[in-house]
Amino acid sequence: MSIIVKNLTHIYNEGMPFASKALDDISFEIKDQDFVGLIGHTGSGKSTLIQHLNGILKPHAGKIYINDFDITDPTLNLTDIRKRVGVVFQYPEYQLFEETIEKDIAFGPSNLGLEVEEINSRVKTSMAAVGLDYEAFKDKSPFELSGGQKRRVAIAGVIAMNPEVLILDEPTAGLDPGGRDEIFELIKKLHKEKNMTIILSSHSMDDMAKLAKTLIVMNHGKIEFMGSPREVFNSNISRLKEIGLDIPQVLELTMKLRDKGFDIREDVLTLDEVKEEILRIMRGRKKC
């Protein structure tokens, strides 16, 4: 499912003394089945953009096309779009409310008016997709689970709607490192196995470098950079730091190695690439 955003603008408190432009005439395109990392400092416009992509917020100007449907058209039935574009908000476990996991995941599909058999099938399929055994977990209360398991339930509830696009706003916020890694692995698996278009907002530059195919860097409501992780990170280190963003730790390491006299390639982005470069240099020194 492709997404085209044209000249999108959103203003909070328009006409008031404290009006602020959260999105400032931004345009971009996301290809079908892409994995997009959305990064930016707090207040850059990431969450505002996410809320526009399934019609939660309406723009003050501009258009959003999802598979040629103009979702800014006031006559469009947004229910159809929200079936196709699922959003997992930050701290999604706060949205869990049913007495059992099965009922919580079934809530969305039930509102679609589906047959009971189809609802049950979707619940089982989505639980399997997020790594929760149906028989072991279906009757448990969501509130008995760990933080990482609650996130899995929340994500299962969204994918039970069978979306073609899955948007996740800081899905690992507040989790310990183990829980964070589990959720990122789950998202990677969903993208691979279900061919979903993924849009992931995160502050973890290292994970973005490893997971995303395309990065969108936002700054004060505008798009600062858009491209592959290698294009964005390796070519814009100084500017990224200027706008208050970290860079992947691998890049910090390579910069320090170069300062020590190691002739490391400028385009490395992974630990494996750094390892290969160090071995290459050491082999060259032995020959000398």
Image (cartoon, rainbow, N blue to C red):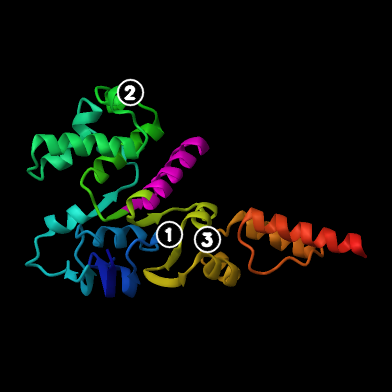
> Eyeballing the image, is 145 above or below 184?
above
Q: Which disc is residue 245 wearing? A: 3
Kindly identify the amino acid type of the residue bearing the numbered disc 1.
Answer: Gly
Q: For residue 117, which quarter of the picture?
A: top left
Of callouts 3 and 2, the N-terminal one: 2
CA separation in Å, label 2 and label 1:
31 Å
Residue drawn at point x = 24 percent, y = 62 percent: 52
The percent position of residue 256, horizontal first and vertical second, equals 73, 60
Q: Find out whether residue 64 is within the magenta segment.
A: no
Of callouts 1 and 3, the N-terminal one: 1
Q: Residues within 10 Å of mark 1 (few under 14, many from 20)?
A: many
Kindly identify the amino acid type of the residue bearing the numbered disc 2.
Answer: Glu
Q: Nearer the viewer, residue 262 or 117?
A: 117
Stretch in magenta: 167-192
Residue placed under numbered mark 2 in the picture: 144
Q: Residues within 10 Å of mark 3 (few under 14, many from 20)?
A: many
Kindly identify the amino acid type of the residue bearing the numbered disc 3.
Answer: Leu
Furthest-right residue in view? 288
Residue placed under numbered mark 1 in the picture: 37
